[in-house]
Amino acid sequence: MTFEDLFALLDNGGCDYGVVAAENSVAGILSHNFFLLNEYSMQIVGEHYLRIVQNLMALPGTTLHDVKEVRSHPIALRQCHLFLSRLRSKGVSIAESEDTALSAKAIRDNQLVGVAAVAGELAAKLYGLEIIQEGIESNPRNFTRFLVIEKRAGNTKHAISKKGQNNKASLSFTLRHEPGMLCKVLSIFSKHNLNMTMIQSLPLPGKEWEYKFFADFVFEDKPACQQALDEVVAATGNVTLSGLYRRGETSMQPFGQDCDRQR
């Protein structure tokens, strides 16, 4: 299942919640998933940080010398750029695909000799592939931030609930083409002591050179957060509160394994 399949399934009521990758600490933002968040009007209800270990896998019996092509999602390929650059210098082709696990599945289903995938250990187990080399990511502090999402119920509200332990917010907004508009919004966050953890922009289809901004920030004081949000709404006139949730924590141990080991 691709991320687009998951959004469509949620939108049609086929499941209650979904988990989608949002950004990676090495390769950056998964911009298409933010586009889908906006396109399907989903609501973020949580986040989780996962330490990612990437592996090179192929049909059983394949050696590194046998590999002529490597396939995977572009974000996974970027996470392993040092290792893959060495393979590319030896004539191995690097091909982008829509998903890490689906790349492994395609090798199994089509019995692709000489083709390897970059994916997690679970994919190798699911599809009967052999890991040729483990831990090929360029940086051991390789984390992906995942968002827990659900279908939005009703109209978007800009109210910060006083209940619960939410301390992080995600919002999106558009700006008029006026000097200093983005600076004005950012100064609102600073004035109310909100710690911005992510900001990015995506083009608005059909509106050349106009953009929608996506921002996350952490807060300690809910009234201050509400005041900041009200001021951003007044300044922009076009704000969507995408989610209020508890900030996730990072861990160097995926699936209970010790990932501080030397590779």
Image: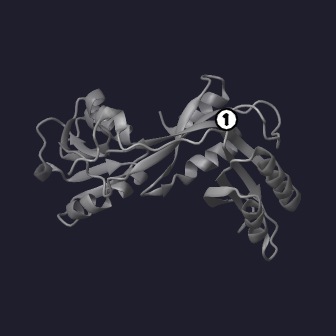
42 displayed left or right of 260: right
Amino acid marked by disc 1: Gln
Q: Nearer the viewer, residue 17 or 72?
A: 17
208 displayed left or right of 116: right
Residue 210 position within the rendered picture, expressed as x and y whole percent measured from the top left? 73, 65
Against 9, residue 23 (above or below) is below
Residue 130 position within the rendered picture, expressed as x and y whole percent measured from the top left? 19, 36
71 displayed left or right of 50: left
Secondary structure of residue under mark 1? loop
Residue at image point 77% right, 50% down: 225
Number of marks in the rendered image: 1
Please, which colouring scheme is shown?
one colour
Against 80, residue 253 (above or below) is above
Residue at image point 66% right, 52% down: 217
Residue at image point 45% right, 47% down: 144
Write down the quadrant of residue 27 in the picture.
bottom left
Q: Nearer the viewer, residue 14 or 216?
A: 216
Residue highlighted by disc 1: 165
Q: Residues within 10 Å of mark 1 (few under 14, many from 20)?
A: few
Residue 49 position within the rendered picture, expressed as x and y whole percent measured from the top left? 48, 42
Q: Nearer the viewer, residue 65 or 17?
A: 17
Q: Is residue 238 visible?
A: no
Q: Nearer the viewer, residue 77 or 142?
A: 142
Residue at image point 80% right, 55% down: 228
